[in-house]
Image (spheres, rainbow, N blue to C red):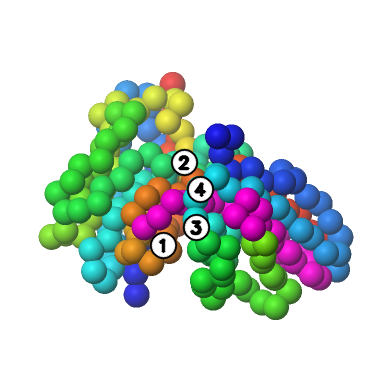
Amino acid sequence: GNSVTQMEGPVTLSEEAFLTINCTYTATGYPSLFWYVQYPGEGLQLLLKATKADDKGSNKGFEATYRKETTSFHLEKGSVQVSDSAVYFCALNTGFQKLVFGTGTRLLVSP
Amino acid sequence: DAGVIQSPRHEVTEMGQEVTLRCKPISGHDYLFWYRQTMMRGLELLIYFNNNVPIDDSGMPEDRFSAKMPNASFSTLKIQPSEPRDSAVYFCACSQSWNTEAFFGQGTRLTVV
């Protein structure tokens, strides 16, 4: 079946550090891939997405590249801020409108 | 558009009581999803609708849970009778079509005591 595996958190970084959150997937067909972010007390918000192999999604300084050969969609940011502290979810959609989410990775950024 | 609107934001109820969670999706979004989030199980899809019709309810945990979508602008998730293990944050989300993002409401935090 379809599944998403994310690195376990929490990921603890100092402000301005480089961020990588790993995400790999298993899917039939050609899924679209997403990163969602959840701030405390709120629902999930789309951060970025990629719909086909080699696409790069980017938003607010975050980037992720759809790598079909390694079935990965790692999230990166060059310099994190305290305000980036949140839970990040990797997800895929194979076209049956069932988003499959990973377990989420909590990011904690300290000043 | 105000986004996905859920009510109530918080609900505390006693075991055995009926609980109804409400959702108003974004106008024109044909897909509606109900998710449950807990620390232990993460984010689980309970049920989703397309054009008001339930498509997949395989995630509904048991018969105590039911969901309806009487029209394009309103959906409910009902738990009857509620149990302490139902305590979680319940999210409603919607999307326009295949390959488009899902928009989430702010969730309803349910506590069953």
Around disc 1, counting alpha carbons within 10 Å, would you say few (fewer than 14), some (14 to 19), or many (20 or more)? many
Q: What is the secondary structure assignment of the residue under circle 2?
A: strand
- Left or right: residue B6 versus residue A43 is right
Give amino acid for label 1.
Answer: Gln
- At horizontal 49% and vertical 56% (from top left) the residue drawn is B30
- At horizontal 60% and vertical 55% (from top left) the residue drawn is B72
Subunit ID for the residue under disc 1: A
Camera-nearest residue between B62 and A103: B62
Q: Position of residue A59 (x, y in %)?
A: 31, 33
Closest to the camera, between mark 3 and mark 1, is 3
Residue to which mark 2 is pinned: A45
Around disc 3, counting alpha carbons within 10 Å, would you say few (fewer than 14), some (14 to 19), or many (20 or more)? many
Q: CA distance from mark 3 to mark 2?
A: 17 Å
Labels 3 and 1 within one chain: no
Give amino acid for label 2.
Answer: Gln
Closest to the camera, between mark 2 and mark 4, is 4
Labels 3 and 4 within one chain: yes
Residue B31 badge: 3
Labels 3 and 2 within one chain: no
Mark sitting earlier along the chain (1/2): 2
* Residue A67 in view in this figure: no
| In the image, residue B73 lies in the stretch drawn in magenta | yes
Camera-nearest residue between B42 and B64: B64
- At horizontal 34% and vertical 69% (from top left) the residue drawn is A2
Around disc 2, counting alpha carbons within 10 Å, would you say few (fewer than 14), some (14 to 19), or many (20 or more)? some
Residue B28 badge: 4
Residue to which mark 1 is pinned: A97
Closest to the camera, between mark 3 and mark 4, is 4
Which image quadrant: the C terminus of chain B?
A: bottom right
The magenta segment: B71-98
Subunit ID for the residue under disc 4: B
Q: CA distance from mark 4 to mark 1?
A: 16 Å
